[in-house]
């Protein structure tokens, strides 16, 4: 019996958004989380997709968070859990993929998509604006607990991409640190922090956080031994 090979990974949809004003739980805010599909080629620039603007550039966008990708498979999981269909872009992602387990993406692996090259830099940590997007203030907590973070990517080579393009994964680092491991560490799961720090491609703010956590654990262990 022959087993048919898995279909190749590809982009299902590409989304961009611009800042909009909202009122959420009595609070005025501005956000670009509401993104909509675009057709045809989209230019990939150094810190963002063309046509995609960030309302809060201190927290979103920039070299390590230029593009956010989420998997159709994970959207389908959420659709089943929530009892309603989630379209591409529902979670504010720029790229909706199929055929990839994004929680198993290795930090630093490169994606060749269209004429652009992207690199996995970190998992997503949800902020309260995701709750606004979903109409449920508790959703960010559920998102974190689900361990389906998607991945943020930096731009290695500018170019253009569009829905339907293949996603070819290459240059996978030997350290093997996966985005899901980094996310699990942040939320308190038992993870080897020193292993996480072995990924030089991990975004600096994550490396700083992991280093401080390592120092804290060492201090706590020394206190325990001295007690």
Image (cartoon, rainbow, N blue to C red):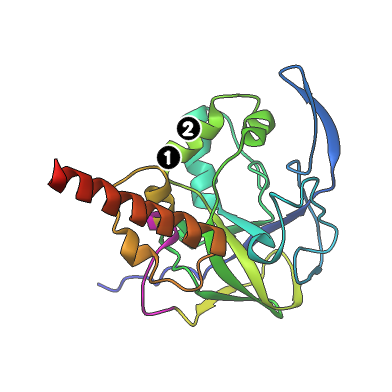
Q: In the current view of this chain or complex, which residue is farthest to the top?
A: 26
Q: Residue at x 68, y 29 (%)?
A: 132
- The residue under label 2 is 142
Quadrant where the C terminus sits is: top left
Q: In the current view of this chain or complex, which residue is farthest to the front?
A: 226
Q: Nearer the viewer, residue 11 or 170?
A: 170
Q: Residue at x 48, y 62 (%)?
A: 207
Q: Position of residue 91 (x, y in %)?
A: 63, 42
Q: Position of residue 19 (x, y in %)?
A: 84, 43
Q: Which mark is residue 47?
A: none
Which segment is the magenta one?
173-181
Q: Nearer the viewer, residue 143 or 96?
A: 143
Could you tell me which secondary element the residue under label 1 belongs to? helix
Bin the neighbour count of mark 2 within 10 Å (Cα to Cα): few under 14, some 14-19, many 20 and up: few
Question: Left or right of 74: which side holds 41?
Answer: right
- The residue under label 1 is 146
**CB under 8 Å between discs 1 and 2:** yes
Q: Nearer the viewer, residue 46 or 37?
A: 46
User: Is residue 180 in the magenta section?
Assistant: yes
Vertical placement of 122 versus 186: above or below? below
Q: Residue at x 42, y 47 (%)?
A: 186
Could you tell me which secondary element the residue under label 2 belongs to? helix
């Amino acid at each position: 019996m022959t087993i048919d090979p898995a279909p190749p990974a590809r982009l299902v949809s590409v989304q961009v958004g611009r800042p909009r004003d909202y009122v959420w739980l009595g609070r005025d805010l501005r956000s670009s989380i509401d993104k909509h599909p675009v057709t045809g080629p989209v230019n990939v620039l150094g810190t963002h997709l063309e046509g995609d603007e960030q309302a809060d550039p201190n927290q979103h966008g920039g070299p390590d968070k230029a593009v956010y990708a989420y998997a159709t498979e994970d959207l389908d999981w959420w659709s089943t859990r929530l009892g309603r269909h989630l379209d591409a872009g529902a979670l504010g992602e720029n790229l909706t993929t199929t055929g990839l387990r994004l929680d198993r993406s290795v930090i630093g692996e490169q994606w060749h998509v269209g004429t652009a090259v992207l690199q996995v830099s970190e998992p997503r940590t949800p902020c309260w604006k995701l709750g606004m997007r979903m109409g449920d203030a508790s959703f960010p907590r559920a998102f974190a607990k689900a361990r389906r973070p998607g991945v943020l990517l930096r731009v290695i080579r500018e170019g253009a991409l569009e829905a339907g393009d293949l996603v070819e994964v290459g240059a996978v680092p030997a350290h093997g640190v996966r985005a899901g491991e980094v996310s699990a560490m942040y939320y308190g799961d038992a993870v080897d922090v020193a292993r996480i720090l072995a990924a030089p491609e991990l975004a600096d703010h994550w490396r700083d956080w992991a280093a401080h956590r390592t120092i804290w654990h060492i201090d706590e262990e020394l206190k325990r031994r001295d007690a």
